[in-house]
Amino acid sequence: MTPLMMSSILSVKISRISVFVVLATLVYGCNLSQLNNPYREKDESANILYSYFSERPKHLDPAKAYSSNEYSFIAQIYEPPYQYHYLKRPYQLVPLTAKSMPRIYYYDQRGRRLAKGFSAADIAYSDYVIEISPGIMYQPHPAFSQNEEGRYLYHDLTNTQIARIEKLSDFSIHASRELTAEDYVYQIKRLAHPKVQSPIAEIMKQHIEGFAEFSRQVAQVGLVDLKNYPISGVEALDRYRYKVRIKGKYPQFRFWLAMPFFAPMPWEADVFYQQSGLKKKNITLDWYPIGTGPYFLEENNPNRRMVLRRNPNFHDEFYPAEGEEFDKDSGLLDDAGKKLPFIEKVMFMLEKETIPYWNKFLQGYYDASGISSDSFDQAVQFTGGSDAKLTPAMLKKGIQLQTAVTTSIFYMGFNMLDQVIGGDSERARKLRLAISIAIDYEEYIAIFMNGRGLAAQGVLPPGIYGYESGQAGMNPYVYEWVEGQAKRKGIIVARQLMEEAGYPMGVDPQTGEALVLYFDTTSVSVDDRPRMNWFRKQFEKLGIKLIIRATDYNRFQEKMRNGDGQLFLWGWNADYPDPENFFFLLYGPNGKVKHGGENAVNYHNDKYDRLFEKMRNMDDGPVRYRIIQKMQEILRHDAPWVFGLYPKDFALYHSWYKNIKPNLMANNRLKYTRIDAEERLQKRKQWNHAEFGPLIIVAVVIVSLIFPALVAYRRRLRERLQ
């Protein structure tokens, strides 16, 4: 290359740099922002709620679904006859598709209707009569599509027709029809069908008249034929009324009627989805629900996103006009009487990692967020009174914090069949109490849960009828009341109990060495080791040697069924807000080894069992309340559990997210929430403004350094040519 050519090339480069500087200056003068926006520009001001999911829900069929990630979707789509009032506490059932609360009639063994003044022992069965509101329509769906002669268009598809279909939206005609009482009856039949494998089928066999017999009768019958088989305890009385007959008295059944299990299912759905060609293309009820709720599932792409859209056929429902005392001052009644739902579309984006999700929330691209351990200190701090509050950085963004103690309990169980730790001897009881005192769950909550929990004083968590707070609700065998709060008893008290139990300083008199106890767990990963070491140290306070026996989940379950475990961790989430749903976990006839029930510790106390049988079917009132407190006292005395903790939910919401109130029983909360899309757009622009200044400064510095050298080089080239 000649010097002249080199000079020309350098001149071009200098010109390009100059152009770059000019363009960069122009760009800097422009207001470019949100270059990191993951959504379409045309949706910036749309009435869309942005949320996330980490794994695809396994079931969207309400007869099968029974997990929180599944309920996040189906509770917005399906409508059982009743729901929980969004604002009122304690939790209160109110009609949803029903016109009123169920009419309940009681009958004796001879089929005579009982008048006032009867006792629970007189009741042979109870009839729940439910009347639904007329005019409620299903979402548009091809299963309802008919031609002019009334023949269903898509109930008997040919291979050629199916070949053209890849997803539900590919069907050209989507129709609807009115909800009827028969749809609720049909769904109960589906719960009974063995092929459906509903997780509540065994429970309902105990309560719904004719349920077990119907299950056996239709075992070899296809779902599409269910409507032709009657079930003795359930029938449609007319187009809008149906009856469910319950064995004896079971007042908790009203809570089941607010769960998606008892949502309606049109028979057309099963006929449509049972076509084998559609099944092969994953067009099933587990993939595409069909309901009457405020939303329908518009898109199901579990590798990217799931989208709910407002149901155009949704019936009239309005935001509640009353709530608790402070709801008005909190702005929770600003939308009173307005038609639901407020949000047009809900987009659930797939997020497998917490950190990317958290960053998008801080940028305003997600409207709400939980708090992982990695981001907890960035979001929340605790005051001297152990109250959680937001950090200054979160407050600056206008983020809202909502906390609530869940209707759940996590506990350490003692296998009451074990010869060392179990049984009703004073020796074993005092050993269990010593361990209950030594395991410092307040410390556990602080270390491993970032303070997101409340040390349990008994079986019932807050929010469940019969729960007592303060000194009256304290466990006096483990705590003492000091300066207005419950304080865990000192380790000296626990060691004294060990001595009274025959294990002075933790020494087993039979071996002359430290007492050895075995802790079965499924916690086997490296991340679980700090927790396991913490439990070892708690037992070391008493001189006990704790052996951790880690195993896989199936082996652990087998040990529980056979009664081979000694100590283990367990938990329970409320199905409904009634004390029966917790106390049954310690009811003798529910023992896991003998009866296969949910009494995982195999506890048995005759007095407790009699009180449970008396309490379980009582209506709430002073008598039931007193019985509940007696049951709590028995369990605290016998200590079949270390009463662990009640978890706390922590959730963050941006300032544009309205009508937020924790409701631990309602799953259909989306219809009450509202988004101020304009505020969201403005804050997104503010938080995600593209800053080109540093880039331009660097470019100018580089040019200023290079340009003199290039000028000097060109001068020398010219001199050589001369």
Image: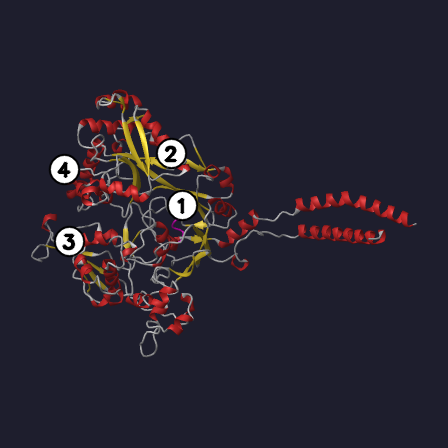
- Of the two numbered discs 3 and 1 on the same chain, state the one appearing first in sequence: 3
Tag 3 residue: 247
How crowded is the residue under tag 3: few (<14 C-alpha within 10 Å), some, or many (20+)?
Answer: some
Residue 476 visible to an observer of this rendering: no
The kind of residue tagged 1 is Ser
Residue 185 picture quarter: bottom left
Tag 1 residue: 330
| Viewer-side residue, 415 vs 702 | 415
How much space separates mark 2 and mark 4, taking CA atoms? 36 Å
Tag 2 residue: 531
The kind of residue tagged 4 is Asp
- Of the two numbered discs 3 and 4 on the same chain, state the one appearing first in sequence: 3
| Viewer-side residue, 467 vs 526 | 526
- Of the two numbered discs 2 and 4 on the same chain, state the one appearing first in sequence: 2
Q: Tag 3's secondary structure?
A: strand
How crowded is the residue under tag 4: few (<14 C-alpha within 10 Å), some, or many (20+)?
Answer: few
How much space separates mark 3 and mark 1, taking CA atoms? 44 Å
- Of the two numbered discs 1 and 2 on the same chain, state the one appearing first in sequence: 1
Q: Tag 2's secondary structure?
A: helix
